[in-house]
Image: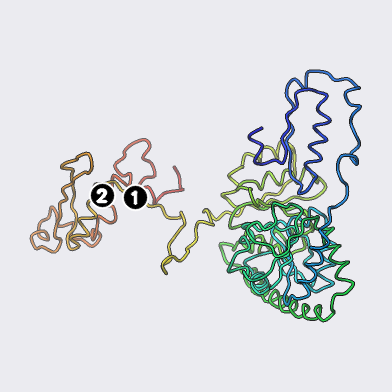
Amino acid sequence: MELMKPITKLQISVEEPYEIPFAVQRCIKAALSGRRSPVFLELRETALVRSATENDFKKLISPEKYRPFYRPSGNPEMIKAAVDLLKKAEKPIIISGGGTIASEASNELKKFSRTYKIPALTTVNGIGAISIDENTYAGSYPLSSTYRRAASEADVVLSFGCRWDYTTIYGSGPLWNQNQKIIQVDIDPKEIGKNRPAEIAIVGDVKAVINQLLVDMESDFPKSMISKWSQWNDYLQTAREIDRNIIDKILKSDKIPMKPERMILEILNNIPQDTLIAVDGGDIALFTFGLISNFHRNPRSTFCSIGMGHLGVGSSFAIAAKLAKPDKPVVCINGDGSFLFNVQELETVVRLGLPIVICVANNCAWGMHKVRPKRGRKPRAMGVSKYTTGKNLQWVAEERVQRKYPNMEVLNSYKVYADGRSWYYEVILVDPSHPVIKSDPKINWICEPQHTRRVTRGLTSAGHRARGLHKKGWGSEKTRPSLGANKGRGK
């Protein structure tokens, strides 16, 4: 029970069989009240082996008598305040999240955005809430130029069922203008003002609240505002067209290796429109969301690991989607790292006989870590494509001596003393430009160019040991010329 508390809305443990139907009613009520969330019902062994009588269930009541079937509306005063704020807005926008889809408010959202010419963005979970065919749709990808312009230039934001989480950069700058006013609509009071303070908070079902706004604005809303907002929308639609032209150049590229955008384009171009897509991974998820906003998606047709999700959930999402909608095709888009997190789920797919297509974008790296952020105006490699061997203390000592005497070469070193705090080494240095060294056939090899600064390249005995070159026999295969040279090949 304790394990389920952080991830479920209600936890019930049942010991007697007559308690089961009442517990089920409580679970259904909790799951469907407010923000819909999972619940957990535990049936103890005693509840399965003991018996119950018909009289035990006479107190059961019908669903309409213990839970509401209507949509909770917003406070009328808050609705009026929201309309008054919109009348003063110069550049309003809508951002729609998963709450809009959960309340089945897509048609109301389209009508509201279309009627008043308010540009509409969506979050990742809100993809499909508004069609790309709408002339007010402004995208769902925060890294696009259109999205950034809308978020930074808008003065009033209508947030419909949107959680201000990391997918929206928590509503913070520089993406979002911190002087803009937020009208937040959410069925969950705990989401109001979370991460981004709300100017006007409306607790209610998104579908019911949008209908309230439509009724209030229809009566006395000035037509001049609609004309002004239409110009603002045209400005963003022009920016969106520029974004499409830029991405088209990348999509037409035939370079090898293939660009990830090209892979996503080929997938989206060759699947039916009603395909259910599960997206998993880091970099490949960003590329997918960057392109998917240019394709028609139905509500509840795109699934991804948002919020408390984790790498590797794509295959599980795909399995669940196929079981829930066996008549629809299912495609799972993975990165090579996220795919291997739960690769064992392939056995589940085969065992259940589920026709699921899994696409793996293999860049042989943790792509989101393989970036070069600028720190101190110097690019710093964050990737793991290059393996650097760990150095032992003797090698470190040799390098320090080399830096102290840069004109000398390290021949070798050996340990002379160790106390409880430090190790002490004696390092043998040779001057490669000295005539005696050059003329001595036993040591003049160190004067050759390939031995310049030999200690920094791990060519001394201590360097060989740290690079794994002192190992012999079984277990030392594929270690030469170093541990890093053959990493990923053979052994």
Tag 1 and tag 2, C-beta contact below 8 Å: no
Residue 32 numbered mark, or none: none
Horizontal side of 112 relative to 396 (left or right) equals right
Nearest to the observer: residue 300 or residue 263: 300
> Which quadrant of the figure contains the N terminus?
top right
What residue is shown at x 74% (from left), y 55% (from top)? 98
Residue 265 rendering spot, x and y as whole percentages: 68, 63
Disc 2 on helix, strand or loop? helix
Amino acid carrying mark 2 in the image: Trp
Amino acid carrying mark 1 in the image: Pro
Residue 395 numbered mark, or none: 2
Residue 477 rendering spot, x and y as whole percentages: 38, 41
What residue is shown at x 65% (from left), y 56% (from top)? 194
> Which quadrant of the figure contains the C terminus?
top left
The Cα–Cα distance between marks 1 and 2, rounded to whole angstroms, is 18 Å
Q: Nearer the viewer, mark 1 or mark 2?
A: 2
Residue 59 falls in which quadrant of the image? Answer: top right
What residue is shown at x 31% (from left), y 44% (from top)? 469
User: Upstream in the sequence, badge 1 or badge 2?
Assistant: 2
Crowd around label 2: few <14 · some 14–19 · many ≥20 (10 Å): many
Residue 275 falls in which quadrant of the image? Answer: bottom right
Work out whether 235 lies above or below 261: below
Residue 385 rendering spot, x and y as whole percentages: 46, 55
Q: Which residue is mark 1?
A: 481
Disc 1 on helix, strand or loop? loop
Nearest to the observer: residue 68 or residue 487: 68
